[in-house]
């Protein structure tokens, strides 16, 4: 491993493997792909080697190292946690919650011990709830535990808006805040702009409502189309934008889940808002100007998260 900055990706499934590839192609750090040998003994070794070999033509020098132990991840600047179980038939929401809470603790405790100065990015569901587990298990400050959810939901929202308006996605500026579930996310229509023009000046209310509904069901739509899996390319791309902003101290303004401290009238609960990401994690938390209805829905999202946190054993 070189002297460059280091990012650990915990979990070498479809999303973790895609994250490693996307990050390697940015050529800004070295990458450790960590997984448990007991799951598929050599899978993460194979994915790391495959990605490393792509560097010959993708043109990057980033090292991609497979790791079986947390000692090999020591000194990481960022740790992305993708590990988690999927819901199975007959399993209640509470069952899944407690299983993934246990997994999160098993991952975060040794990860934080090996890299006590790292920033944690949580990519596992239920994401907002698991951020609470990650913060407790790591003992890290508010600024260094971040939930990835708003970035993915925002990507879907902007995609649908750009397609409906028939314009470049680069000229769509809108965000999804609140929770990272199909009932608690809040696409912020009130300040969505298309090329500097309010969305309501270009699209009818019926079309906007349909875009909002499709955004909120965006994950389920992809699961329904894929049949045997869930999204991994857009989630990986979104998460690695967060990592890049931290590693390069870019100060990007990004929709993330953060432990709110009075914003939107919410206290001590993880919920999505705009944050400034740079060296050390969250450098500033913003309370976005939203409509009264949107603010009420953001508050309801936090209440739902708080309720689920109370169910954890």
Image (cartoon, rainbow, N blue to C red):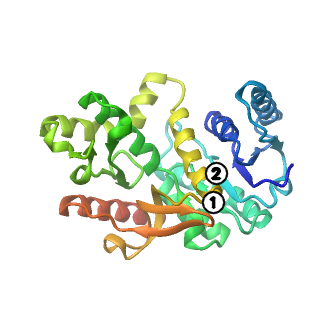
Which circle's residue, 2 or 1, is located before the other in the chain? 2
Residue 281 % position (x, y)? 59, 64
Side of 115 relative to 128 (left or right): right
Residue found 76% across the figure and 38% down from its top: 39
Give whichever of 273, 13 is nearer the camera: 273
**How dense is the environment of label 2, judged by Cα within 10 Å: few (below 14), some, or many (20 and up)?**
many
Q: Is residue 207 above or below residue 186?
A: above
C-alpha gap between disc 2 and disc 1: 7 Å
Residue found 67% across the figure and 68% down from its top: 138
Q: At numbered mark 2, what does the secondary structure look like: helix, strand or loop?
A: strand
Q: Quadrant of the C terminus?
A: bottom right
Q: Is residue 26 above or below residue 115?
A: above
Side of 216 relative to 102 (left or right): left
Give whichever of 206, 132 is nearer the camera: 206
Residue 258 % position (x, y)? 48, 64
**Numbered label attached to residue 244:** none
Give whichever of 80, 282 is nearer the camera: 282
Q: Is residue 219 above or below residue 289?
A: above
* Residue 311 appears in the picture as rendered: no
**How dense is the environment of label 1, judged by Cα within 10 Å: few (below 14), some, or many (20 and up)?**
many
Residue found 34% across the figure and 52% down from its top: 184
Residue 35 % position (x, y)? 76, 44
Residue found 55% across the figure and 71% down from its top: 142
Q: At numbered mark 1, what does the secondary structure look like: helix, strand or loop?
A: strand
The residue tagged 1 is 120
Give whichever of 63, 143 is nearer the camera: 63
Q: Is residue 87 above or below residue 257?
A: above
Tell whether label 1 touches label 2 (CB within 8 Å).
Answer: yes
The residue tagged 2 is 81
Mark 2 or 1: in front is 1
């Amino acid at each position: 491993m070189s002297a460059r900055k280091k990012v650990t990706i915990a979990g070498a499934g479809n999303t973790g493997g895609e994250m490693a590839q996307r990050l390697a192609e940015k050529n800004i750090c070295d990458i450790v792909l960590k997984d448990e040998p007991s799951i598929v003994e050599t899978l993460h070794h194979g994915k790391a080697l495959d990605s490393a070999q792509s560097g010959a033509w993708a043109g990057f020098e980033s090292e991609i190292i497979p790791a079986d132990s947390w000692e090999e991840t020591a000194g990481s600047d960022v740790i992305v946690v993708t590990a988690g179980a999927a819901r199975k038939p007959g399993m209640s929401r509470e069952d899944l919650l407690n299983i993934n809470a246990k997994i999160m603790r098993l991952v975060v405790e040794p990860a934080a011990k090996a890299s006590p100065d790292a920033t944690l990015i949580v990519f596992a569901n239920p994401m907002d709830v698991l951020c609470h587990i990650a913060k407790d298990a790591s003992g890290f400050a508010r600024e260094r535990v971040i939930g990835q959810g708003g970035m993915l939901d925002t990507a879907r929202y902007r995609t649908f808006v750009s397609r409906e308006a028939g314009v470049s996605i680069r000229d769509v500026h809108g965000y999804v805040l609140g929770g990272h579930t199909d009932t608690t996310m809040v696409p912020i229509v009130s300040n969505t702009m298309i090329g500097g023009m309010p969305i309501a000046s270009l699209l009818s209310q019926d079309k906007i409502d349909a875009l909002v509904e499709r955004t909120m069901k965006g994950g389920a739509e992809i699961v329904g189309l894929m049949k045997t899996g869930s999204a991994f390319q857009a989630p990986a791309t979104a998460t690695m934008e967060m990592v890049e902003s931290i590693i390069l101290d870019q100060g990007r303004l990004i929709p993330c889940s953060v432990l709110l401290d009075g914003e939107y009238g919410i206290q001590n609960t993880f919920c999505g808002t705009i944050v400034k990401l740079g060296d050390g994690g969250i450098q500033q938390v913003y309370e976005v100007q939203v409509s009264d209805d949107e603010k009420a829905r953001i508050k309801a999202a936090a209440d739902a998260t708080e309720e689920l946190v109370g169910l954890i054993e």
